[in-house]
Image (cartoon, rainbow, N blue to C red):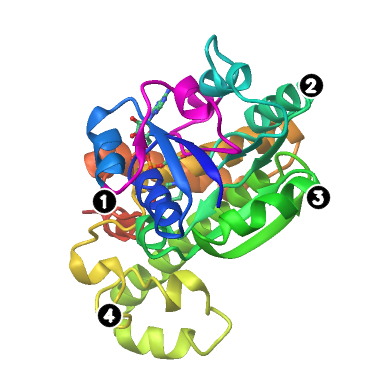
Amino acid sequence: MARIGFIGLGNMGLPMAQNLLKAGHSVQGFDMSQVQVDALAGSGGTAAASAKAAATGAEIVITMLPAGQHVREVYLGAGGVLSAVAAGTLLIDSSTIDVESARAVASAAAAKGLAMLDAPVSGGTGGAQAGTLTFMVGGPDDAFARGKPILETMGKTIVHAGGAGNGQAAKICNNMILGVSMIAVSEAFVLAEKLGLDAQKLFDISSKSSGQCWSMTSYCPVPGPVPASPANRDYQAGFTAAMMLKDLKLAQDAAKAAGADTPLGADAAKVYGRFVEAGEGARDFSGVIRYIRGI
Ligand code: NAD
């Protein structure tokens, strides 16, 4: 069993750390919010007073933070993780961040002889609680082999996507598909309504035809056809529109930096931007159909 330092015990990090505890690992955790640290201690973990304290003596350090600037600060800042850990410690960042920050932190770690994985997730808070997350992992082969058994205590599907930053690349490419496809499916349902075509009929046909996709058959944005989708509970998140906007912006930044032309991704970022500006950021991202319908 490993001694793990866990930094960032929010909606995702806390249940992930609790699954590590359930599997028998010891976890020393830190978060800016004392409430979250206390919740970890209440589940059998150890409260750490700083990121440095959480990382000190750990064989593995896992971070689950909001954005690239927090990850840079926690690893590279004065009193950060890189200044605290012993040689041989494995570093795993599971936050969703920009590819450039992921590669910069991994290369600073490598310069100190430390192996690092970027391992962003999909599956949301439900997946974090159930231990069924999908991890998309970037980093060296030997670091992946070491990290995989630990990731398996928090997730069900663990995919090695290549070198440093490729986990983040996979995450933003996937979510760009999701953002665009949710808008496409929503536009189709709104057009169907205006043409007098029943939503259930469109679903029955498209779910068995070439319009079939995850946004249609697993997360349908109209109430009825898929009982588990957020449309049936007034678009309570799920995966918030604000999070989708964050990922679409990361995809646009990466596309600009790499010289890739992604016009539909750019339009999707604009649509979600307006939806969030309208005060709907905390709603599920499939609620974008309400914006498309003009509500
Ligand atoms: P969250 O805001 O609930 O948690 C982030 C935590 O980090 C907070 O508790 C905050 O206090 C803490 N934090 C911030 N700066 C810190 C610092 N310097 N030191 C220590 N702690 C610090 O966010 P979340 O929903 O847990 O998401 C975390 C990451 O996972 C994000 O990158 C997000 O994009 C990604 N993600 C979230 C979901 C989801 O459904 N919530 C799904 C997939 C991926």
- Span highlighted in magenta in the image: 43-71
| Marks 3,4: beta carbons within 8 A | no
User: Picture coordinates of residue 186 (x, y %)?
Assistant: 39, 65
- Dot 1 falls on a residue whose secondary structure is loop
Q: Nearer the viewer, mark 2 or mark 4?
A: 2
- Dot 4 falls on a residue whose secondary structure is loop
Tag shown at residue 111: 2
- Find out whether residue 63 is within the magenta segment: yes
- Find out whether residue 268 is within the magenta segment: no
Residues 92 and 123: in front is 92
Residue name at image x 50 percent, y 43 percent: 247
| Marks 1,3: beta carbons within 8 A | no
Residue at mark 3:
141
| Marks 2,1: beta carbons within 8 A | no
Residues at marks 2 and 4, CA–CA distance in whole angstroms: 51 Å
Residue 76, compared with residue 113, is above or below; it is above
Residue 261 at least partly seen: yes
Q: Earlier in the sequence, mark 3 or mark 4?
A: 3
Residue name at image x 31 percent, y 81 percent: 199
Residues at marks 3 and 2, CA–CA distance in whole angstroms: 17 Å
Residue at mark 1:
283
Residue at mark 4:
227
Label 4 sits on what residue type? Pro
Residue 212, compared with residue 33, is above or below; it is below
Q: Nearer the viewer, mark 1 or mark 3?
A: 3
Q: Residues within 10 Å of mark 4 (few under 14, many from 20)?
A: some
Q: Quadrant of ligand 1?
A: top left
Label 1 sits on what residue type? Arg
Label 3 sits on what residue type? Asp
